[in-house]
Image: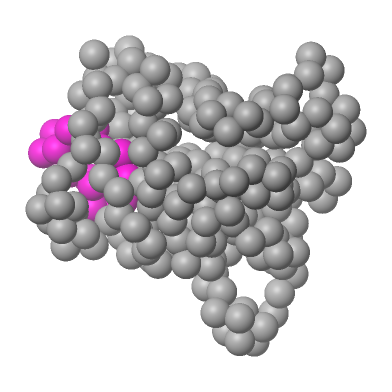
Amino acid sequence: MRLVTAAWLGRMRYGDAHALQETLLQARMRGDIGDTLLLLEHEPVITLGRGADRSHVMISPEQRTRLGIELYDTGRGGDVTYHGPGQLVAYPIFDLAPDRCDVRRYVADLARVMVGLAGEFGVGAGVLDSKLVGVWVDLDSPQVWPESPGTRLAKLGAIGVRLSRWVTMHGFAFNGSTDLSGYRWIVPCGIADKGVTSLVSLGVEVPPVEELARRSVGFFERAFEADITWATGEQVEELVAKR
């Protein structure tokens, strides 16, 4: 069974979290640390993946500065996405070797976590084809994911990953009480003909993001056949100091 240490880091600026991931990635590749799961939320930020079309950012630098929205190029896969308060962000620093060296399986496992978490709140979420990565809700059937999803689809959770020698970083972003107005400044994940949703916009009473994080751990355990323990306050402080 995979042994994982989970840490709730609260609200962090994207640059700080990215620097921490990079440090932990190198440490995991050297074998200095075990598998680690970072759970947090971000200040408002637009991020661009390796294959991002910069025209999908539809806000000027001046507007971003005025609204306090940062912008970062990242090393993850995917296009453009938005992070903000109320959104659960999960960054697994996992070594998938030797038995889980399959990118599609890894992405599917991250989706399973979010589908399970959505189900905790009575929302029926599901996945589509490989070109529409993430977790979706059929707005005509939000309580049940239908066998044949309709045309009113909205993304509840985004996935973007990077692997180095089968060690992972980046991960997923799950919209709990996220202010969806932030998505109007981008073409989310480069998909212009489908919407974005959140638990709140689906009529769910959503707990704080820390509670979403804690509820997600059981689904990580099942998806990754893992035994997850929570980092102590001292361990979290040590992690944050590594940024």
Q: Name which quarter of the figure residue 101 lies in.
A: top left
Q: Is residue 174 visible?
A: yes
Is residue 105 depicted above or below 161 in this figure?
above
Residue 45 image point, x, y percent: 53, 66
Identify the residue at image location x=35%, y=22%.
221
Identify the residue at image location x=76%, y=41%.
154
Residue 201 image point, x, y percent: 71, 49
Please state if 75 lies on the left or on the right of 165 as rendered. right
Q: Nearer the viewer, residue 141 or 50?
A: 141
Is residue 78 depicted above or below 167 in this figure?
below
Identify the residue at image location x=55%, y=79%.
68
Q: Residue furthest front?
A: 205
User: How many numbered circles are shown?
Assistant: 0
Residue 81 image point, x, y percent: 61, 55
Give the image's coloring scheme: one colour
Q: Is residue 24 magenta?
A: yes
Please state if 71 lies on the left or on the right of 148 as rendered. left
Which of the image's four quarters has the N terminus? top left
Which of the image's four quarters has the C terminus? bottom left
Q: Is residue 53 visible?
A: no
Is residue 13 depicted above or below 4 in this figure?
below
Identify the residue at image location x=74%, y=56%.
187
Q: Name which quarter of the figure residue 229 lies in.
A: top left
Residue 38 image point, x, y percent: 32, 45
Please state if 159 lies on the left or on the right of 31 as rendered. right
Q: Nearer the viewer, residue 194 or 203?
A: 203
Q: Which residues are magenta?
A: 21-38
